[in-house]
Amino acid sequence: MKIIVFISTLLICTTLYASNNEWEGLILKKILHSISKHQEIAVYSKNKVLVDELKDSRFIHIVEDCTKCDFVLAKDEVNNSCQKPTIVFSYYDYLHTPTAVGVFFWQKGRPTIRFSEKRLRSFHLHVTGELSKFVSTND
Amino acid sequence: MSQQTTNKKIKIGFVQLGIIIVFILFVGSLSYSKYNDTLHETTKSLNEKIIYFHFETFKELEKIFLNDTDNHFLQTVIKEKTLRRNFEDMMNLIRISTIQNLFVVAKKRDNEYYFLLDSEQDLKKRANIFEPFDPLGNGWNRCYESKKPQMFYHTKNKDLWITIIYPIVENNQTVALIGADISHQLDINMEKKLQDFTHFFFWLMFLSIAFFALLYLLTLYFRRKYYDSYRDPLTQVYNRKYLYDVVIKKLSRSYQLFMIDIDLFKDVNDTYGHVAGDYILQEVARRIESLIRNEDSIIRYGGEEFLVYTTTLNHKQSLEFAERIRKKVKYEPIIYKDIVCHITVSIGVNADATRDKSFDEMLIEADEALYKAKLAGRDCVKMSK
C-alpha cells in the first residue's frame, strides 16, 4: 500500500512539475525565436532546469562556452563577462543587468514578459511577431 | 400448493428484486440530484454574497485612497513613499485568507500597466512600484474604460479563481485599478464535497444492490431447501411430511381425497427389478401430475401409494377425475428399456371430505374405498359412500 501511495505521489508530482516546466519552456522558446536573427540559436545557461526545457528543440542548441552563444539565459546568477544579450528571470535582474535585453517572470500568478528597446538596439536585435507588444521604451 | 408453485414463486422473487433495485436507484438518483442542486445553489448564493462583500470593501478602500490623497491619488502615491507604505499595510490588513493577491495597478500613456501598490509583505513575491503588470484578458481595460467593477473567473495553477477589479475614479476618470485574486475555495470545497458524496452514493448504491441480491439469493436458497424437505426425492412429488405440515393446516371446508395404489407393484419389482420399479413409480407420478391443477396436490403417501388432494370437485366430477387418472395410467404402457409394462391403478375416493371431521378419519374413508377397489379386482375406482 505504501509503495502504491509513494508511486502515485511521485507520478502526480512529476506530472505537475512537467506541465509547469512545459509552459515555461514554450514561452522561453517563443522569446528566443522572436529576438533571434537566425533560425539556429546557440544558448548558454548554467541552469539545468532551463537547459532541460530547451533541449527538445531542433533549432536551439545549448553550448558550453559562453563566448560561442547567441543568448545567455541567466536565472540564478548573472554573469556579465560574456557581454552577450541576456534573458533574465526577475525584474530586479532586468533592471540591474545592462546586457539584459528581456525578462520573463511570474508575478501574481501571471506570466510577465518585457523587452528593453534600448538594450535590444545596442545588440542590433529587434522583436518580431506577437511578442513585439512587450517591447518597452521606458526601461 | 402444487409443484409448479415453486417456480412461480421464484419468478415473482425476480420481479420483486428488480423492483427493489429500480426503487433504490430511483430514490438514490433523486436524492443525489437534489443534493447536487442544493449544493450548487448554496455555493452560488454564498459566492454572490462574498463578491458583494468584496465590492463593498473595495468601495471603502477607494474612498480612503481618495480622501487621504486629496483627490490626487496617482501623483501622491508615486511621490510619497510613506503614504504608499501605509496604504500597503492597510491593504494587507483587509486581505483575508481567501484573497491571494491584492494590489493596485495604473496605466501609462502607452497603455502599459504597472504596479502601484502591493499588499504582499514577502519580498520575494512582492511587486515593486513601476514593475510591469501584464493583464490577462480584457477585464482590466474594460474596467478602466467603463469605470465599473469587473469580475471574471479563471484558472490559475490548476485551481479556480475569481479576479475582482475595482476602479479608483477621480474627477470622473479612472486613475488606477484595485485588483484582487480570490481563491475560489468555496467551489473547490463544494466540488470536493460533491465528489465525496458521489463516492458515498455509489458505494451505498452498490452495497444496497449487493445486499438485496445476497438477501434474494439466500431467500432462494432457503426456499429451495424448504421445498426440498417436502419433496419425495424419487418422484419429485410432495411427501407425507408435506401432507401433515402444510396441507392439513390449510384444509378447505370441503375437499376430496384420492388414494391411488399401483396394482401388483410387488410383482413388478420382483419381475423387473427395483430400478424398473422406481422408473414406474416416477412415470405414474408424472402422469397423475399432468392431470391435476395448480391448486391441487399430489403426495407420495406410501411405497406405491399416492394421495391427490383437490378442493372444488363434486361427487360426479370426483369420479370422472379418478377415472381419468386410472385411464391415463392404464392405456399407455410404461416402457422401461425394452420392457413394456402394463400398469394399472386402483383408486379410492372420498369426495365428501370435510374440515369438520378429523383428517385421519377422512383419509381412512378414502383408504377403505381403495380397499373396496382392490377387492373388486383392482384397476377400478370406488367411492367412499
Image (cartoon, rainbow, N blue to C red):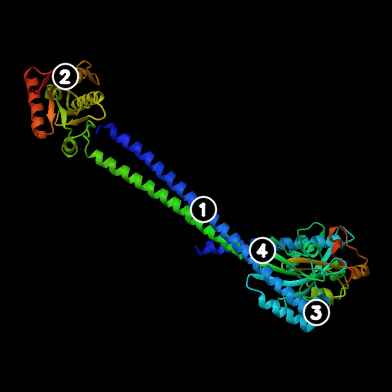
Q: Secondary structure at mark 1?
A: helix
Residue B342: percent from left, percent from top: 18, 17
Mark 1–mark 2 Cα distance, whole angstroms, equals: 66 Å
Mark 1–mark 3 Cα distance, whole angstroms, equals: 54 Å
- Kindly report which numbered mark, 1 or 2, lies closer to the viewer in this rendering: 1
Whichever of labels 4 and 2 marks the residue nearer the N terminus, that label is 4
- Residue B262 position (above or below residue B185): above
Whichever of labels 3 and 4 marks the residue nearer the N terminus, that label is 3
- Kindly report which numbered mark, 3 or 4, lies closer to the viewer in this rendering: 3
Q: Chain of mark 4?
A: B
A97 sits to left or right of B4? right
Residue type, label 1: Lys
Residue where numbered disc 1 is placed:
B34
Residue furthest to the top in view is B331
Residue type, label 3: Asp
Q: Is residue B306 visible?
A: no
Q: Do pointers 1 and 2 mark residues of a single chain?
A: yes
B213 sits to left or right of B366? right
Q: Do pointers 1 and 3 mark residues of a single chain?
A: yes
Q: Chain of mark 3?
A: B
Q: Which mark is residue B70?
A: 3
Crowd rating for badge 2 (residues with CA inside 10 Å; few <14, some 14–19, many 20+): few
Residue furthest to the front in view is B171
Crowd rating for badge 3 (residues with CA inside 10 Å; few <14, some 14–19, many 20+): few
Tell me the quarter of the picture where residue A6 sits.
Answer: bottom right
Residue type, label 4: Trp
Q: Chain of mark 1?
A: B
Mark 2–mark 3 Cα distance, whole angstroms, equals: 120 Å
- Kindly report which numbered mark, 2 or 3, lies closer to the viewer in this rendering: 3
Q: Which mark is residue B161?
A: 4
Residue type, label 2: Lys
